[in-house]
Image (tube, helix red, strand yellow):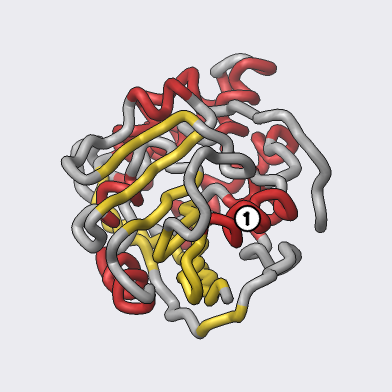
Amino acid sequence: MLRGAMSFIDLFSDTSDLYAAARPRYPDELFALIAATAPARRRVWDCGTGNGQAAASLAAQFSEVCGTDPSAEQIAHATPAPNVRYSVQPAEATTFPDRHFDAICVAQALHWFDFSRFFAEARRVAVPDALFAAWGYTWFELTPEFDAAFDATIKHVIARYWPPQTRDLWNGYADVPFPFERLPAPELRIRVRWTFPQFFAYVHTWSATRRCIDAEGPAFFTAARDRLLPLWGEPETVRAIDMPMFVWLGRIN
């Protein structure tokens, strides 16, 4: 699916501090793979950096990390690191020089971009044979009983409030045109250990959750909490949650 010019859709700035605290971290092996596959470890661009989760992890692998996001509020709450430089810029048109980055990464954000313009910009700022990496995750796995109750009380209730761009994410970007030389990618999972309040804070960061609350009020969210908590246990009980990921790797040549 190709997209023409589109304005920035800002669904996260109003909860950028909560977003920074609640979003899960990506596995370290992903960033080690990116560094090992890039032609060098000088500079990497983290497009749509949000709160800088990926940028902070890339900082351990590359000499310089440039994290960009069109949301000034997200950048204001981004994770600091000595070798990370954040800026408010759209992914489709940046001020970076030509042939600047050894790797270009997009964490859970590619579906928001204008694909044709972004891929053209990626080619412009990439060094020869630079690595392109994009990844995402969708739903979680806890227990069959909890997952079924969650689907009934939250997932199905908020379904009509998801922006249309999230369909690309749920499909693992299968319908997104991939213009680079495809490289094999491993199967990875995000594994988090959360209390119930931490889990529910994460669900609250979803754009569809907040849009549904704005439109219909918070009663469904409160009712879901009351139904799900007994299936979780004590609120401060730490539970292991798995989130399957999909990873795109490519060579920009």
Amino acid found under the numbered disc labelled 1: Leu
| Residue 190 in which image quadrant | bottom left
Q: Position of residue 227 (x, y in %)?
A: 46, 36
Number of marks in picture: 1
Q: Is residue 183 above or below residue 4?
A: below
Q: Does 39 sit above or below residue 199?
A: below
Comparing 79 with 126, the one in front is 126
**Quadrant of the drawing holding the N terminus:** bottom right
Q: Residue furthest front?
A: 98
Pinpoint residue 131: horizontal percent, then vertical percent. Answer: 46, 70
Image location (x, y in percent) of residue 79: 26, 36
Residue at 56% from the left image edge and 19% from the top image edge: 219
The residue at the point 57 percent across, 43 percent down is: 91
150 or 104, nearer to the observer: 104
| Camera sees residue 230 | no
User: Is residue 23 visible in this depiction of the protein?
Assistant: yes
Is 210 left, or right, of 216 in this rendering?
left
**Quadrant showing the C terminus:** bottom right
The residue labelled by disc 1 is: 169
Considering depth in this image, is 86 or 234 the residue closer to the camera?
A: 86
Is residue 115 positioned above or below 68 on the image? below
At horizontal 52% and vertical 33% (from top left) the residue drawn is 89
